[in-house]
Amino acid sequence: MSSSLDIKYEMLAFDRKDREYYDNFTDEDRKKFSTYLMLRYGASVQGNTDLQAYYLLATNENVNKYFFDLGKHPKLQWLMCTSVSPGMGKQHHYWQAAKKKESNSKAVKFLTALYPQLKDDEIELLAEINDKRDLTDMARNLGWDDKRIKSEL
């Protein structure tokens, strides 16, 4: 194995279910290789929705459950990753960013309290489309005084 790892070759080994791929690494490659990247890239593929759903569900079922429990065993993590592919040849995998941390903005907190039945993305959208004046009007309609509005919005 070369000393420079490349995600396209790693994902090819992932899709081929190449269980010996990790064994062929040099010590230097093993230090650089990230099984976490395999987990993140492996869960997302382009293609029809059934295939996308399969990869996501298989990653959750076969890898996510125990991935971090095996943090000191990267070969076992790699072997878990190789169990994801349905053996349908090379797929185009892409990076799926982790969910953003919860917003601490005052607008989001206000809207969450006002609309507890809404999902996080709906609250974020409301916070984006309503400016400070809109939120102030909502608070006044709820009977808030100017002092409370200023401190909480």
Image (spheres, grey):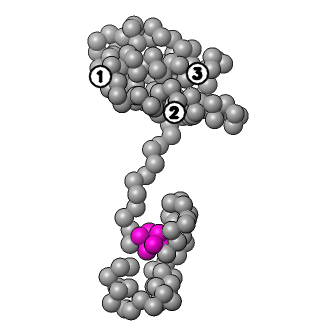
Q: Is residue 49 above or below residue 118?
A: above
Residue at 45% across / 91% down in the picture?
143
The residue carrying pointer 1 sits among few (fewer than 14), some (14 to 19) or many (20 or more) residues within 10 Å by Cα, namely few
Q: Between disc 3 and disc 2, whose residue precedes?
A: 2
Residue at 41% across / 70% down in the picture?
109
Q: Distance between the residues labelled 1 and 3?
A: 23 Å
Task: From the image, tell me which residue sits under label 2.
Answer: 60
Residue at 28% across / 12% down in the picture?
27
The segment highlighted magenta reads 107-113
| Residue 21 occupies quadrant | top left
Task: From the image, tell me which residue sits under label 3.
Answer: 85
Q: Is residue 74 magenta?
A: no
Quarter of the C terminus within the rendering: bottom left
Q: Is mark 2 on a helix, strand or loop?
A: helix
Q: Distance between the residues labelled 2 and 1?
A: 20 Å
The amino acid on which the numbered mark 1 sits, given as a three-letter code, is Lys
The residue carrying pointer 2 sits among few (fewer than 14), some (14 to 19) or many (20 or more) residues within 10 Å by Cα, namely some
The amino acid on which the numbered mark 3 sits, given as a three-letter code, is Ser
Q: Is mark 3 on a helix, strand or loop?
A: loop
Horizontal side of residue 31 vs 4, given as left or right: left
Q: Between disc 1 and disc 3, whose residue precedes?
A: 1
Question: Residue 72 — which label?
Answer: 1
Residue 4 visible within the image: no
Which residue is nearer to you in this view: 31 or 63? 63
**Proximity of marks 3 and 2: CB atoms separated by less than 8 Å:** no
Tell me the mark number nearer the camera, choosing from 3 and 2.
2
The amino acid on which the numbered mark 2 sits, given as a three-letter code, is Asn
Q: Where is residue 13 in the image (x, y as percent from the top left)?
A: 51, 16
Horizontal side of residue 87 vs 10, given as left or right: right
